[in-house]
């Protein structure tokens, strides 16, 4: 009888042990699997953090380079636009000065009636023949008629009327032209 009880206890014991180790095995199987997954997740997280940092570093570099290129470009643009402006201004000035001072030839048309088409006449039978005069001499005479200071033959008023229509650059152009007649 004792033996039977012992055998039963022994059977029970082993049965309990078996079932316990079975559940333990199941646990130990699932634990490593989930740790591995979470490890991998951590690795991926670390790697993607690194990638994100690299990307933001590169983005910063790109921004800096873009800023530099932009400032270089704008500096160049300023120089180019300055050069263009001076060029345009000087061209415009050239156009203005060429239209503002009609050639001496054109201006002399209003003088030729009295002085002759080559300045070879005594204007109104009174003036000297101005053909052969130097540009300086003509310029001085015209400026003096313009202010009313000159009256060589008693007809200075007639020349005052003529000279006061002329600008100083007109007088220069005219004087040059007449001196070459
Ligand atoms: C209406 C006729 C007339 C016209 C037009 C005329 N002149 Fe005269 N010019 C005279 C007379 C007259 C005198 C002499 C004035 C004086 O008494 O000093 C004279 C004198 C001069 C003199 C100085 C000569 C001297 O004897 O001392 C010059 C230079 C001259 N004229 C240039 C011009 C020019 C340039 C023009 C055209 C812009 C012009 N004249 C148009 C009549 C004219």
Image: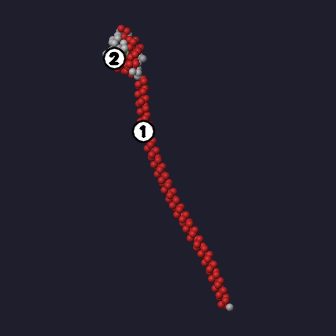
Give the camera-side residue of 99 and 154.
99
Image location (x, y in percent) of residue 116: 36, 12
Image location (x, y in percent) of residue 119: 35, 14
Identify the element where label 2 is drawn: loop
Image location (x, y in percent) of residue 126: 35, 9
Question: At x 44% / y 39%, what residue is drawn?
Answer: 78
Question: At x 43% / y 29%, what residue is drawn?
Answer: 92
Question: At x 43% / y 34%, what residue is drawn?
Answer: 85
Quarter of the image that includes the N terminus: bottom right
Task: Farthest residue to the top: give it.
Answer: 125
Residue 103 visible in this rendered orientation of the protein: yes
Query: Label 2, on which residue?
Result: 181
Quarter of the image that includes the C terminus: top left
Q: Quadrant of the rendered structure where residue 138 is?
A: top left
Question: At x 60% / y 74%, what residue is drawn?
Answer: 26
Identify the element where label 1 is drawn: helix
Residue 34, above or below 114: below
Left or right of 176 in this view: 61: right
Query: Label 1, on which residue?
Result: 79
Residue 41, above or below 89: below
Q: Quadrant of the rendered structure where residue 176 is?
A: top left
The Cα atoms of the two marked residues, 1 and 2, are separated by: 48 Å
Nearer to us of marks 1 and 2 is 2
């Amino acid at each position: 009888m004792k033996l039977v009880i012992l055998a039963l206890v022994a059977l029970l014991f082993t049965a309990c042990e078996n079932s316990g180790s079975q559940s333990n095995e199941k646990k130990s199987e699932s634990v490593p699997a989930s740790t591995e997954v979470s490890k991998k997740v951590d690795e991926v997280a670390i790697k993607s953090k690194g990638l994100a940092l690299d990307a933001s570093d590169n983005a910063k570099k790109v921004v800096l380079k873009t800023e530099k290129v932009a400032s270089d470009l704008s500096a160049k643009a300023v120089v180019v636009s300055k050069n263009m402006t001076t060029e345009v201004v000087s061209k415009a000035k050239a156009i203005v000065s060429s239209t503002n001072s009609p050639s001496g030839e054109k201006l002399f048309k209003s003088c030729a009636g009295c002085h002759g088409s080559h300045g070879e006449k005594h204007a109104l039978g009174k003036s000297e023949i101005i053909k052969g005069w130097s540009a300086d001499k003509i310029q001085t005479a015209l400026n003096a008629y313009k202010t009313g200071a000159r009256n060589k033959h008693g007809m200075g008023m007639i020349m005052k009327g003529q000279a006061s229509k002329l600008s100083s650059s007109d007088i220069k152009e005219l004087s040059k032209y007449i001196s070459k007649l």
